[in-house]
Every structure is written in C-alpha cells, then in structure tokens.
Amino acid sequence: MIRFLTAGESHGPALTAIVDGIPAGLALTLEDINRELERRQQGYGSGGRMQIEKDTVMITGGVMNGLTTGGPIALVVQNRDFKNWKEKEIPAMTTPRPGHADLTGAIKYGYRDLRLALERASARETTMRVAVGAICRKLLAEFGIVIGGYTVQIGDVQTALTSDTDYLARFQAAEASDVRCPDPQVAEAMHEAIRQAKIAKDTLGGVFEVVALHVPPGLGSHVQWDRKLDAKIVAAMVSIHAMKGAEIGHAFENAGKSGSQVHDEIYLEDGRLIRKTNRAGGLEGGITTGEPIVVRVAMKPIATILQALQSVNLATGEPEETTYERSDFCALPRAVPIGEAMLAIVLAQALLEKLGGDSMAELYTRFQQLRQARLTDLPMDNVVWRFGYE
Ligand code: EPS
C-alpha cells in the first residue's frame, strides 16, 4: 500500500516527504517531479512568495540509478524564503484571522503564539503532495492512466463546459491559460475578476475539475465504507488546504433530477458493456466503471485578506481587526495540479490494492489479467438459487 507523510513549516528550512509502498523498478527522474512542482507555481493571483521560491526536489532515498528500489522514497524541497526569516525577530501574532487555522490550532495545541498554527497550516505543504503525486502519476502512466485538470469557476465567473468535450484537449487548453481555464474568453473574465479582487483588497475562491482517463473498471469496493473509492477521492480533495467540498461527477446538479435523467444506461457493443453518458463521474458503488473519473472541487476564498476583519486580540482580550500577512489573492489556478496530485495518489493506492505485487514486472503481468467490462469476462450461472445460510 502506498502511504506518505509530509513534514516542515512554510518558512522553515525545508519541506520533507516520505513515500512508502512504491513498487521496485519504476523509472523516475528529478525532472518527472520538478515538472509538476513548476506547474503548481504557475498561475495568476499569487502573492509575493512565488517570486521567491523555485521549487526543485532532492531525492535522498528509495531511487537509485533512475529506478525505484521498493524502499521508502525520501523527498526534500528547500524553502528559499527561509534565509529571510532565519535571523528575524518575529513580531507576536495574537489576533486570529477568521477562516484560517490560527484560532482552532491554538485551541487544539495550546500555542502561545498563533504563528505556530500558521506555519504548518500553510498551503506551502502542498508542494510535497505534488511531489508525491508526481511519483504516483508516473506509476499510473505505465498503465496508460492519464490525469489532468482545469478551472471551471473563479468567484462568480463560470465556464459552460459541454459534456462531449475531448478531455485531453481541455487539459492542453487549460495549461496555456494563466488561470488554467480551457475557454480563452472565460479565462479572460476570470483573470479580470482576480484583478478586481486585488484592487478591492479581497480574495476569491472557485471550483476546479480533475479527471482521470483510462482507469480500469473494478478499482475500489462496495463492501465496506472505508474501501469505497469515491469516498477516498472526496476525502483526499477536502484534505487540501481551503477546499470545502468535492463531488463525483455533477453530484449536486444530479440531486435535483429524477433517476431516469441521471443514471448512465448500459449498452452492449462489440462484446463490451458501454455507457453513452458518464453522469456518475466514473464510479458506481464505490468502484470504477472504466469511464473517466471526474471530480469537482470547491475552494473557499483565501482567509488571509488585505481588508481587516473583526477579531479579538488574545493577548489583551480586546476586540481587534486582523493585520495582513503576505498571501495569495486567488490560489485556484495553482490548486488544480494539487487536486491532480491527490487524485493520482488515491488511484495509485487503489491500483496497487487491486494488483498487489512489489515490482513493476509483477504489476504489468497482473494488469493484463484484470477483468474488463466485457460480456466474456462476466459469465453468469443464470439458474434459480437460494440464500444458503446454515
Ligand atoms: C500561504 C501563504 C503564502 C502562500 C503560501 C500559502 O505564503 P507566504 O505567507 O510565505 O506569503 O504563498 O503558499 C506557498 C508558499 C506555496 O508554495 O504555495 C498560506 O497561508 O496558506
């Protein structure tokens, strides 16, 4: 099973991750990871920090001569900004920002300065998720699985995506946009909405979609709550900083329709069981259907706002307005590669759970033997039977 942990503070010396369970024999280069780290740093709406950092990874364990060993992979990314904080006397931070982890972190851990909560709650941590995701993405690519994503909404500016669009074309178009929106006209309106938010000293959230293509049917399980793949995907998305909701397919829109309008009918074509629609977003009963996995994620507007919000100074007990900490105005475009990384991690876990195996050689063989949605793969007894409990 793939597991990972991250460590490090936003303005500390470095961020670290350890990834366990990646099979032996996967070809992996620094460039595979650095490419994804760079994608996470692109996008309009960032604050000053992205001018300072240029994230690149160091691999200090688990990969030798370009191949994974099967041992834990250790990853380190330096924080360039650390040199600016190292010798600095840090002013006391005692007025919590509404919407951030300042107050809840202090309640939970008994901090006597709120910066300790800020440092670990910062979305800087997502650097390591993207690094881990890049490894999982490489693993999935060995089996033809492709993951991409794009922005569908920033503030109240929305794209009207049609259901028949070629996903690869969407991924590509999004990559060329500084707000990661595949529709150039809407992208311009989104860019403008962020610019206005900056002028208004405010922040914006939005919605992005991440999609996995060519995922085999039969990953996940319906038999236990904590084995349902849709639940794992939603949990992974909402674990990303500032994400407050996630849905598989258009779940909330489907909720307002009748069953006959929602469910994807099944047809037999050339011996294969196919769907002409994918309203289920690639999952039924917590198991992949073989259709694209489509996940939509809602991000709240960033909690650090240039405008002062009402709060309380915990040191004096007096009402006090928040003071500004450098931050982003809209991080939605940069959240897309993070969502992709989390989807890659969960899908790589699900694939390994299905295939087992410690080396890529074992995995390739087992992958070929996976049951498909073909009539010949699904022999039925077609006889009367009984519940035979003793
Ligand atoms: C963040 C605040 C900003 C962001 C940071 C997340 O950092 P700083 O306080 O140093 O200006 O830039 O994100 C990153 C550093 C990053 O790499 O994404 C926050 O409060 O969550």
Image (cartoon, helix red, strand yellow):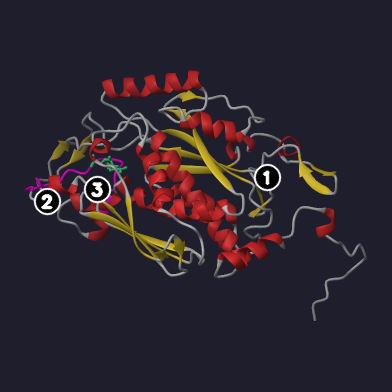
Kind of element beneath mark 3: helix
Q: Is residue 255 magenta?
A: no
Which x, y percent locates residue 250? Answer: 60, 37
Callouts 2 and 1 close, C-beta under 8 Å: no
Magenta: main secondary structure: loop
User: Alpha-carbon distance for marks 2 and 1?
Assistant: 50 Å
Which one is in front, 281 or 374?
Answer: 374
User: Alpha-carbon distance for marks 1 and 3?
Assistant: 41 Å
Question: Label 1 crowding class (10 Å Cα cut-off): few <14, some 14-19, many 20+?
Answer: many
* Nearest to N terminus: mark 1 or mark 3: 3
Callouts 3 and 2 close, C-beta under 8 Å: no
Mark 3: amino acid: Asp
Q: Can you identify the residue that label 1 sits on?
A: 291
**Image disc number at residue 102:** 3
Tell me if residue 87 comes above or below residue 164 in the rendering: below
User: Alpha-carbon distance for marks 3 and 2?
Assistant: 22 Å
Residue drawn 58% across and 27% down?
A: 161
Question: Label 3 crowding class (10 Å Cα cut-off): few <14, some 14-19, many 20+?
Answer: many
Which x, y percent locates residue 26? Answer: 51, 60
Residue drawn 84% across and 57% down?
A: 376
Extent of the magenta region: 88-105
